[in-house]
Amino acid sequence: MLTININKLKGENLESQQKFLSFNLGIKDTAVISLQNITEVLQVSLVDICGVPQMPSCVLGAYNWRGEMLWLVDLEEMLGYPPLSHNANFLAKMMAIVLEDDGKCLGVLVRQMMDIEFLDNNQMKAPSAELFSSSISPFLQGYFLNCDERMMFNLDASAIIHSPLWNTHN
């Protein structure tokens, strides 16, 4: 079940507040994606995904989504984490976030959904090469610090959808 977490600091401007979906990334990290780029969140069984040969290993395959073909990607593997599918029971349901940008959709599988977060864009910090690996940096808009001073990676849905990785396999 998703809950709503309102992170407000004194003097925050409500116009700079934006809603984000937060989820686990790897075993200990947290990531967020703006709700503006999320079309739907759904449960997917790995047996319902049609594998496609000669695709990057992070591409799990195609899925029938509302009568349309939706590519499903292991977001963790794409970002340099160990693949989700290696530890998954093929009958178990996994969570997929359907991202949309410029009419293109892509489904990204994630470990676990967490909350809807209200975050202040003015509080977002710029990513630096010292903090993030080269595999995740191209997909980061920045990061937020939560109330426990832990980082929440702000992923760029557009960069994920339009990754050069997909261009080599069209």
Image: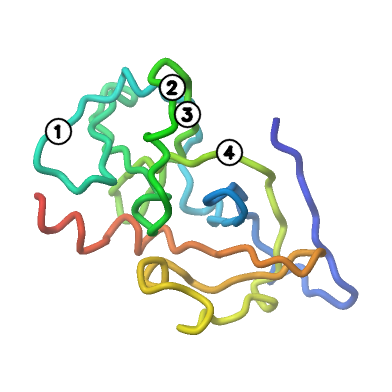
Which quadrant is home to the N terminus?
A: top right
Circle nearer the N terminus (1, 3): 1
Tag 2's secondary structure? loop
* Residue 20 screen position, x and y as percent: 61, 54
* Residue 47 screen position, x and y as percent: 32, 18
Tag 4's secondary structure? loop
Q: How many labels were placed on the picture? A: 4
**C-alpha gap between disc 4 and disc 1:** 25 Å
Q: Which residue is mark 1?
A: 52
Circle nearer the N terminus (4, 2): 2
Q: Residue at horizontal 21%, vertical 25%?
A: 50
Amino acid type at image mark 2:
Asn
Residue 94: numbered disc: 3
Q: Residue at horizontal 61%, vertical 80%?
A: 125
Given contact means CB atoms under 8 Å apart, are the residues at marks 4 and 2 in contact?
no
Amino acid type at image mark 3:
Met
Amino acid type at image mark 1:
Val
Q: Which residue is mark 4?
A: 112
Residue 84: numbered disc: none
Q: In front: 12, or 148? A: 148
Mark 3 surroundings within 10 Å by alpha-carbon count, few (fewer than 14), some (14 through 19), many (20 or more)? some
